[in-house]
């Protein structure tokens, strides 16, 4: 069973922010912003490559609700999912990073300069 499935099953503790029947949101153990929450589907999906439109529809509503709960909806926030090797995905259970609480720099998550690959 993967790490995030163990969090869903409460085998590994997590600091949970919001939960419903299908999704779970919990604080990242190594936050990259004042607010850094991970959102996962409770049913295991490897990555964005495999997720269905139906799951994404529920995920969208859940993240919108989460942003209100965290009081970051008005000032803004960032939603990121890393996919596979080049995307830098370390945990192979689909998750969205929800980052906020400060004006975020853009460079951190896009630090491969296209000029270096021409
Ligand atoms: P990825 O690099 O796969 O997009 O993101 C994985 C994220 O999971 C990282 O930001 C990392 O800090 C977080 N993470 C890894 N292990 C744990 C854990 O056991 N608990 C929590 N809450 N976050 C974790
Ligand atoms: Zn899993």
Image (cartoon, rainbow, N blue to C red):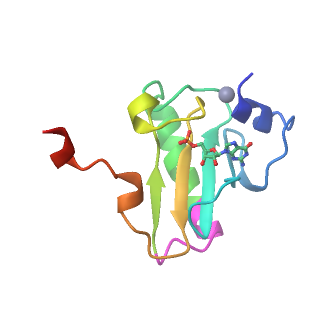
For the point 77% across and 36% down, which residue is it?
Answer: 8
For the point 56% across and 74% down, which residue is it?
Answer: 101
Check the picture and name the quadrant holding the N terminus. Answer: top right
Magenta stretch, overall SS: loop
Query: In the rendered image, which quarter is residue 2 located in?
Result: top right
Q: Position of residue 109 (x, y in %)?
A: 40, 53
For the point 20% across and 44% down, which residue is it?
Answer: 116
For the point 16% across and 48% down, which residue is it?
Answer: 115
Q: Position of residue 63 (x, y in %)?
A: 55, 54
Q: Residue furthest front?
A: 116
Taking the image as shown, residue 61 lies to the left or right of residue 25, namely left
Q: Nearer the viewer, residue 114 or 19?
A: 114
Magenta span = 66-75
Please determine whether, in this image, residue 1 is positioned above or below residue 27: above
Q: Is residue 42 magenta?
A: no
Please determine whether, in this image, residue 32 is positioned above or below residue 6: below
Please determine whether, in this image, residue 80 is positioned above or below residue 107: above
Query: In the rendered image, which quarter is residue 30 located in?
Result: bottom right
Taking the image as shown, residue 6 lies to the left or right of residue 50, namely right
């Amino acid at each position: 069973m993967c790490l995030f499935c163990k969090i869903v099953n409460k085998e590994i503790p997590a600091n949970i922010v919001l939960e419903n029947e299908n999704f779970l949101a919990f604080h990242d153990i190594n936050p990259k912003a004042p607010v850094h929450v991970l959102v996962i589907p409770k049913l295991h999906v490897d990555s964005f490559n495999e997720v269905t439109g139906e799951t994404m529809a529920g995920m969208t509503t859940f993240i919108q609700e989460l942003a209100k709960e965290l009081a970051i909806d008005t000032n803004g926030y960032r939603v990121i999912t890393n996919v596979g090797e080049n995307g830098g995905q370390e945990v192979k259970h689909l998750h969205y990073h929800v980052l906020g609480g400060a004006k975020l720099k853009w460079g951190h998550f896009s630090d491969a300069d296209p000029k270096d690959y021409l």
